[in-house]
């Protein structure tokens, strides 16, 4: 079997995408009334919730986007699969931490920035040295 970068997209590929979107390692608990919810777009501010594992999510997202733009970019597909495998091994959602959220004047919430969390939190966010 060979990959055909010009072949037709399989009808069930969207089902596979949904599986990865709803993996526990790809989810975090937050308030329902968010002002910064990106919807289906990548959650760029989630580093404050995910911490050091955030790079795995970013790399997976970038590799998927590269592959979708250029299906012949097999290396990007392999990178995405590797990172998605790491995310799939995460067995629980990221819990609610009130310190990760900023309350807006209208009562809605948004993710805090790393700068808002301060230097100690930034040290926690850094991936562990390999």
Image (cartoon, rainbow, N blue to C red):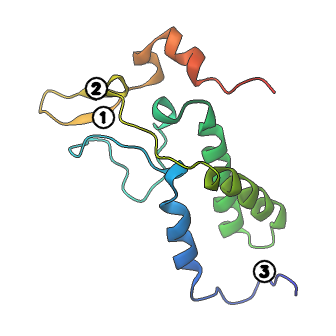
Q: Label 2 belongs to which residue?
A: 102
**Residue at (31% x, 27% y) in the render:** 98
Q: CA distance from mark 2 to mark 1?
A: 5 Å
Residue 83 placement (x, y as % from top left) = 70, 52
Relative to 54, residue 67 above or below? below
Q: Secondary structure at mark 1?
A: strand
Q: Nearer the viewer, mark 3 or mark 1?
A: 1
Q: Secondary structure at mark 2?
A: strand
Most distant residue in the top direction: 119
Quarter-of-image position of residue 122: top right
**Residue at (50% x, 47% y) in the render:** 92
The circle drawn on residue 65 is none
Relative to 62, residue 17 above or below? below
Residue 79 placement (x, y as % from top left) = 77, 56
Assess whether mark 1 and mark 3 are in contact (beta carbons under 8 angstroms).
no
The circle drawn on residue 110 is 1
Q: CA distance from mark 3 to mark 1?
A: 40 Å
Closer to the chain start, of discs 3 and 1, is 3
Q: Label 3 belongs to which residue?
A: 5
- The image quadrant where one finds the C terminus is top right
Q: CA distance from mark 2 to mark 3?
A: 44 Å
Q: Secondary structure at mark 3?
A: loop
The answer to whether residue 127 is seen in the rendering is yes
- The image quadrant where one finds the N terminus is bottom right
Closer to the chain start, of discs 2 and 1, is 2
Residue 15 placement (x, y as % from top left) = 52, 78
The answer to whether residue 61 is seen in the rendering is no
């Amino acid at each position: 079997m060979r990959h055909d970068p010009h072949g037709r997209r399989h009808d069930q590929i969207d089902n596979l995408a949904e599986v990865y979107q709803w993996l526990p390692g790809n989810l975090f608990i937050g308030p329902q009334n968010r002002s910064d919810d990106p919807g289906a777009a990548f959650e760029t501010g989630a580093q404050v919730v995910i911490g050091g594992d955030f790079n795995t999510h970013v790399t997976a997202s970038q590799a998927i986007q590269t592959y979708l733009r250029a299906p012949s970019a097999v290396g990007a597909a392999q990178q995405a699969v590797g990172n998605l495998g790491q995310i799939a091994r995460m067995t629980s959602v990221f819990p609610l931490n009130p310190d990760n959220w900023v309350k807006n004047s209208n009562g809605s919430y948004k993710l805090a920035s790393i700068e808002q969390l301060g230097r100690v939190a930034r040290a926690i966010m850094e991936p562990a040295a390999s």
